[in-house]
Image (cartoon, rainbow, N blue to C red):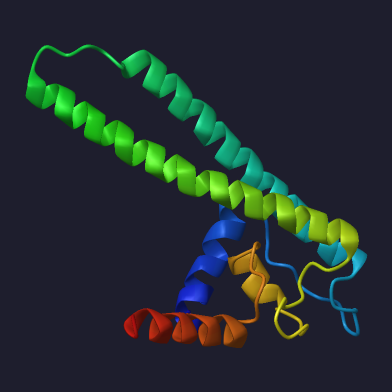
Amino acid sequence: MPRKKIQKEYGSLIEQFGMKPYKAKAREKYMSKLQQKHFRKLLLAWKEQLELEAEETVKHLKTDSNNLADPNDRATQESEFGLELRTRDRERKLLRKIQVSLVKIDEGTYGYCEETGEEIGLKRLEARPVATYTLEAQERREITEKQFKDTR
């Protein structure tokens, strides 16, 4: 993932929940209690938003699932419902990642790369709070995945 994209997302997710980027104190240990509290708050806000959107989708599907007489209208509605359900499915997977991240905070393993054990970094975690790899490890994984896919 290019660095510019991370910086662009960095402000938007934090700002979306009315939060400010975490500013580490001088000599503050990585993933201190304050940092853990910050990321727990961010993850819980994101989780709450996704759950509310899922509830809205259920309401929308229940109230707007009319038996439309016109086949074109019915096809359009079914297509819209399909897109909405695929989006919610991706968000369901994201909710699972959020839950795993919250457990990692409790266990003291949040913020460390699953591949290298290195610090993921505060900015990357604010851009993508469910990140499990450093930027470099993620890029290596994506390159390897692409190469493997291309050889099939």
**Residue 105 visible within the image:** yes
Q: Residue at x 65, y 62 (%)?
A: 130
Q: Position of residue 61 (x, y in %)?
A: 38, 22
Q: Please tell me whether residue 82 is drawn above or below residue 87 in the rendered image.
A: above
Q: Residue at x 55, y 44 (%)?
A: 92
Q: Residue furthest front?
A: 152
**Residue 17 visible within the image:** no
Q: Is residue 107 left or right of residue 41?
A: right
Determine which quarter of the picture holds residue 87: top left
Q: Nearer the viewer, residue 65 or 44?
A: 65
Q: Is residue 77 left or right of residue 28?
A: left
Q: Residue at x 88, y 83 (%)?
A: 26
Determine which quarter of the picture holds residue 117: bottom right
Q: How many marks?
A: 0
Q: Please tell me whether residue 106 is drawn above or below residue 116 in the rendered image.
A: above
Q: Position of residue 110 (x, y in %)?
A: 79, 67
Q: Please tell me whether residue 86 is drawn above or below residue 134 in the rendered image.
A: above
Q: Position of residue 63 (x, y in %)?
A: 37, 14
Determine which quarter of the picture holds residue 25: bottom right
Q: Position of residue 23 (x, y in %)?
A: 76, 73
Q: Residue at x 89, y 70 (%)?
A: 32
